[in-house]
Amino acid sequence: MAEKVLVVIPALDAEASIGRVVSGALEVNPDVLVVDDGSTDGTGEEARKSGATVVRHDVNRGKGAALSTAFAWALERGYDAVVTLDADGQHLPAEIPRFVEEWRTGGADLIIGSRRHLFAGMVRRRRMANIFSANAISFAAGKKVDDPQSGFRLYSARLLRGVKLTGTRFDAESEVIVRAGRGGFTIASIPIGLAFVDGLETSHYRALLDTLRIAWRVLLTRIGGSSQGEVDRRQ
């Protein structure tokens, strides 16, 4: 029986771009879920009009909370894997099948779309931040990760069942890498293209606050050891 894959798009005030992202995702995968994380514009309406299923948070709870909502939704409905991409249009939905094929042939539990080959095209502060975070999170996870800040990813259902996230904002995406690495799950990377390299104008990432939050979450996760979920990942 063919595996069921859900495409997930966490979205906040992405009315201008969400329709194109949903339409592109539906061209390559039949099931698309948008988590409208407390948007104040027409993000949810545009997503529905474009064919996505929409789950809404009444208030903004953060990207990590949106991902947790989507992961629970996917597991309840028996999906075998979840592919996540950003709502601003920087990720290319046409590349979704590459993640799925890598998962089916290689069996990795977490596949990250790496932009490392594009770092030279980023402004210096962002390039240096990405390189630093890659080194720090690789050390914390015990496995090499080229681009831990990339939101274009595939998560296996096994990983989603086995790892419990506590971060509710951008820190959750770093936390899951550390938990996956320390919990014995397989992590892989594939190079991806981008519609635009920097994404500074469309990103909700707050450089100082979110970087500090990520660093703190990674430290807590690293010194905290394996969670019970990771111990039980094979059940």
Image: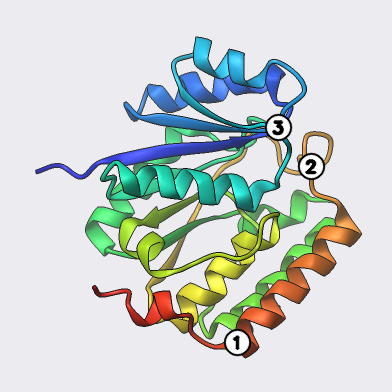
Horizontal relation, residue 81 to residue 139: left or right? left
Residue, disc 1: 224
Q: Residues within 10 Å of mark 1 (few under 14, many from 20)?
A: few
CB atoms at circles 1 and 3 under 8 Å apart?
Answer: no
Q: Residues within 10 Å of mark 2 (few under 14, many from 20)?
A: some
Horizontal and vertical percent for residue 177?
A: 54, 70
Residue, disc 3: 38
Residue, disc 2: 204
CB atoms at circles 3 and 2 under 8 Å apart?
Answer: no
Q: Residues within 10 Å of mark 3 (few under 14, many from 20)?
A: some
| Residue 109 appears anywhere in the view | no
Horizontal and vertical percent for residue 62?
A: 70, 47
Q: Is residue 224 above or below residue 166?
A: below
In primary-sequence order, the first of circles 3 and 2 is: 3
Towards the viewer: 22 or 131 = 22
Horizontal relation, residue 209 to residue 188: left or right? right
Secondary structure of the residue carrying tag 1 is: helix
| Residue 166 appears anywhere in the view | yes
Cα distance in 3D space between marks 1 and 3: 31 Å
Secondary structure of the residue carrying tag 2 is: loop
Residue type beneath disc 2: His
Q: Is residue 170 above or below residue 61?
A: below
Q: Residue at x 32, y 45 (%)?
A: 76
